[in-house]
Image (cartoon, helix red, strand yellow):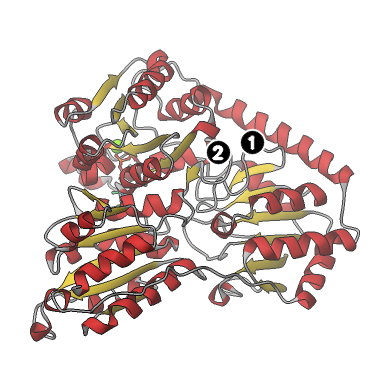
Amino acid sequence: MRALEGMAEILKREGVEYLFCYPTTDLIDAVADVGIRPIVCRQERVGLGVADGLSRASNGAKIGVFAMQAGPGAENAFAGVTTAYADSSPLLVLPSGYPRDREGWPRYFTAERGYRNVTKWLETINVPEQTEDAMRRAFSRLRNGRPGPVMVELPTDVAELDIGETGYEPVTSTRTLADPRDVERAAHALANANAPVILAGQGVLWAGATDEVVELAEMLGAPVAATLLGKSAFPETHALSIGTAATSTPPMVRSFLGKADVILAVGASLAKHQMNLPLPEGRTIIQLTNDEADLNRNYAAAHPLLADARLGMRQLIDAVRDAGGTNASRRSAVEAEVASAYSAWVDSWRGKLESQDAPINPYRVVWELNRVIPADDAIVTHDSGSPRDQMVPFYRSAGPRSYIGWGKSHALGTGLGFAMGAKLAEPDKVCINWMGDAAFGMTGLDFETAVRNGIPIITMVSNNSTMAIETRRLVGSHEKYGTRDVGGNYADLARSLGGWAERVEDPEEVGPAILRARRATEEGRAALLEFITSAETALNR
Ligand SMILES: Cc1ncc(C[n+]2csc(CCOP(=O)(O)OP(=O)(O)O)c2C)c(N)n1
Ligand SMILES: [Mg+2]
């Protein structure tokens, strides 16, 4: 078999069901031959987003794989790869490469050089005999340690060379426990804390550690915040949930963190980053992560624990119990405080959340979505800009992966691909992305990818005909040249692309329209709801 066929066969043995792709690459026909379904997108960036959404929504059980041509294909994929790199999502990227005799030629884009700084691992298969080992190295990195995008470039001439038969066996994953001595010290700090707070990062999701975080939180009576990427790692419907600690954040997060003496960060990098709420100074930090590069990165950790989140949490739970950390009275006091702080906060926003205004207040869309679709039935994601900052604080996610929180690097338009990937991972869920009109401008034509491939998602567009989030920055130029404004009728566009669509102008129709869109998706149609919204600038900051 040729190296190309070997690669297709190895993907098949690794359980890959879809190849997200854009021509020209011979891998598309090669995978079709072995029964992997190619899904052709309208541009590489979005195809990578679909692959990434599949990886995230399936929690890495189904690795998203994307293939594209050398040169322009590899170049146009950049934002999709950097998104996965910034957020640490496992993706396999398979660019074809120029023939080896052109290696090093001036002005040729070589993926292996161009992507070095934004991948967990990358290599070029420069002799056909390396195909099997290169793919094994790739899958081993995709299934172990901190996730990230992995790239294997196959030059078009190597692809044609014979590799004989392959005896490839799929790669398994393995996990690590924390050092028991460190666990004991950390447990002692938690058991003796006056006001412990747990911060759940995305490592909780990847490790499947939600039950353990719930168990420890309930035992300690500790409130739990999630990071942006960890949103849904702890059910936000739980009485101990204080919400997501992002740029735009519920006030409970600030108040409980402000009072905390011990902070347990689990599966979180604790990076100082504009998408993470900064931690207050001078607290005892216990940091449980599987990546040593995160330890002591921006905050000194009194108790670093290097372990898989689930295994490490199980150790901590046992040790906290042994140290007498169970605290039922604190639990009921914290739950009562969370409940009253939550209602006071929601009451102060009710004017926007239940606004009767037209154009529709975007907060009302978020609120209605949460009201009419049970969070357990859905996988929801935002887009960058105001839609993220409106959705993240108010939308209450349910179980793990009922929300895809993303955006350490936040390329506009990314949420559309994520919703498609989520739908392929979980066909029975209602998969929804909430995006602004500027975000739609970046990737919106890929709504047709959902239509054409029978991926019935709901894309909700907040059409305020402007970039509301730029109101504070584009000031003089806007007055002089109208630089903030954009235009379009996106429901018309979605219909012309073959989808089901509605334009919603009446605030009373927001909830009913979402339910109509859900029904359309249940009939197999990709749906787009265009909400005519106000240029809302109020944020939870
Ligand atoms: C690829 C990319 N370019 C630029 C930005 C910076 N940016 C973030 S939000 C935004 C405007 C968002 O406008 P829109 O999507 O209409 O949302 P609105 O704030 O109006 O609700 C811009 C330019 C970005 N996130 N990604
Ligand atoms: Mg806008």
Q: Position of residue 109 (x, y in %)?
A: 15, 74
Indicate the quadrant where residue 518 lies. top left
Mark number for residue 397?
2
Alpha-carbon span between mark 2 and mark 1 = 7 Å
In-image side of 367 versus 480 (left or right): right
Indicate the quadrant where residue 159 lies. bottom left
Local crowd size for mark 1, using a 10 Å CA cut-off: few (<14), some (14–19), many (≥20): some
Question: What's the residue type where badge 1 is placed?
Answer: Thr
Farthest right residue? Answer: 324
Height in image: 95 above or below 397? Answer: below
Q: Give the mark nearer the N terminus: 2 vs 1.
A: 1
Height in image: 295 above or below 206? Answer: below
Local crowd size for mark 2, using a 10 Å CA cut-off: few (<14), some (14–19), many (≥20): many
**Answer yes or no: do the residues labelled 2 and 1 have beta carbons within 8 Å?**
yes
Numbered disc 1: secondary structure: loop
Which is nearer the eye, 315 or 269?
315
What residue sits 64% from the left and 47% below the top?
253
Which is nearer the eye, 223 or 9?
9
Which is nearer the eye, 135 or 271?
135
Q: Is mark 2 within 8 Å of ligand 1?
A: no
Question: What's the residue type where badge 2 is placed?
Answer: Ser
Q: Position of residue 268 (x, y in %)?
A: 58, 62
Height in image: 494 above or below 193? Answer: above
Indicate the quadrant where residue 137 lies. bottom left
In-image side of 141 versus 224 (left or right): left
Q: Position of residue 304 (x, y in %)?
A: 68, 73
Q: Which residue is mark 1?
A: 237
